[in-house]
Image: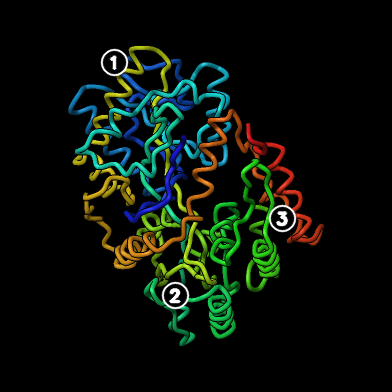
Amino acid sequence: MTTVGVRRSRRLVRGGMRRLVPLAAAASAGALLLTACGSGGSSGGTSKSLTFWISTVPGQDAGWKKMVAQYKKETGVAVKLVNIPYDGYTTKLHNAAQANSLPDVAAVPALDPIWSSKLIDLSSIANTKSNNINANFLAKDSSGKVLSIPSDVTASGLFINKSLFEKAGVSFPTSPSKTWTWTDFIAAANKVREKTGAKYSLTFDQSPSRLRAMVYEMGGKYVHADSSGKFSVDAATKKAVNTFVGWNDDKTMPKSVWTSGADPSAMFQSGDVVAYWSGVWQVASFADSIKKFDWASVPTPAQPVQASDVNSGGMTVGFNNNSEGATAAKKFLSWLYEPAHYKTLCETSGFLPVESGLNPTYPFKSEAAQAAFKLYNEEIPLYAPISGYFNTAQTNWVLKGKSLTEDPTKTELGKAINGQQSADKALENIVAGYNQQVGGAS
């Protein structure tokens, strides 16, 4: 029915993607926008003008800008690129569908039942042998229609302030074959904090995806459905989440990230935090933005499971707003996934490719960035199958007309970190939210 992958090695996107397997995205826009317009609203493109929505972090939008400029030069078709902040992106898409003003093309973090029926079938692109697109990462319906192709793949990952580790004389692993446990990592990060006077040992994205990755590595399944579609959490998940809540003590981790939305990336980039749990999509940005200290990507902890939350960095889709626009959108996507063009996209944006055999040459001058991409490529083949569970689950929900419109993870765990409820009660409420929104067989 729907296979949205999880598996296989590959590239390195900001992705992160996510991306052993399937999904994610991020944000910044610019001058290259051909025929720009603030809202990006459209009732459908034409053979000479298309609208393309993305949501990506600074640095990762470079590839999209380059590709739409090249497409305009080669074909004369203007592609208006609109970069939308991630926090409001799914809502904007939802509202656009209701207003009959969807873009022609988009890189989305997830499918939505409200507009999934308007998606163009991308089977001809996915099945073109020369494209070598990994079928494990495609979102398909039961008839075999390809609803989306990943823009890239992403995975959660760990960054450290290498300068602080070296100053403290604390070692860290460099190979996924000899990685550390979370217990070992936290002990090492706390030692570095204490020896160097850093403010926090770790910042951790306020993200259900990042939490899932940590839980998987501690042997849990997080919020997982049985064959009837009923969600629950296992003992290992409860233990991992209680551990996580305990780390938020304003020493090991700042409470402000999960309780009030403080920016963990900015904290890490300040140089006053030992480590940061985020994902591969940060690499392209850090390659340029971090100047005051040496940083490094390090192997993800395994306690005892080597895993991550792997997704598509973005799910590339086309919308059938009108016949002319749909035809033009499919032509653009067919052009985009031709290996030479897609390789350029991956190299410029720092994506891990969904197409095999490309061997992108990333232009980063940063040795840390090059090493990070190498590390993710080494790690992804080692991740347990659980790593792709959520990505595949999301697509299956959509095909049943359901969607997790509001993941209760952030709100409920924020309350636990604030001392308003226990971690176990938070999980109970999260499970209830999943069961209400996407539970059941149909």
Could you tell me which secondary element the residue under label 2 belongs to? loop
Residue placed under numbered mark 2 in the picture: 179
Mark 2 neighbour class, 10 Å CA radius: few under 14, some 14 to 19, many 20 or more: some
Residue 393 in sight here:
yes
How far is mark 2 from mark 1, CA to CA?
52 Å
Q: Can you say whether 370 is above or below 326 in the image?
A: below
Query: In this rendering, which labeled residue sits more in front, label 3 or label 2?
Result: 2
Residue closer to the observer: 268 or 120: 120
Q: Can you say whether 346 is above or below 442 in the image?
A: below
The answer to whether the residue labelled 3 contacts the one labelled 1, judged by CB atoms less than 8 Å apart, is no
Could you tell me which secondary element the residue under label 1 belongs to? loop
Q: Position of residue 211 (x, y in %)?
A: 59, 58
In the image, taking residue 433 as reference, residue 283 lies left or right, namely left
- Three-letter residue code for mark 1: Ser
In the image, taking residue 44 as reference, residue 233 lies left or right, namely right
Q: Position of residue 183 (x, y in %)?
A: 58, 77
State which tag comes first along the sequence, 3 or 1.
Answer: 1
Label placed on residue 414 = 3
- Three-letter residue code for mark 2: Thr
Residue closer to the observer: 267 or 386: 386
Residue placed under numbered mark 1 in the picture: 47
Q: Looking at this rendering, what residue extends furthest in the front direction?
A: 227
- Three-letter residue code for mark 3: Gly
State which tag comes first along the sequence, 3 or 2.
Answer: 2
Q: Can you say whether 74 is above or below 21 in the image?
A: above
Toward which corner of the image does residue 233 lie, by quadrant? bottom right
Could you tell me which secondary element the residue under label 3 belongs to? helix
Q: Can you say whether 293 is above or below 113 in the image?
A: below
State which tag comes first along the sequence, 2 or 1.
Answer: 1
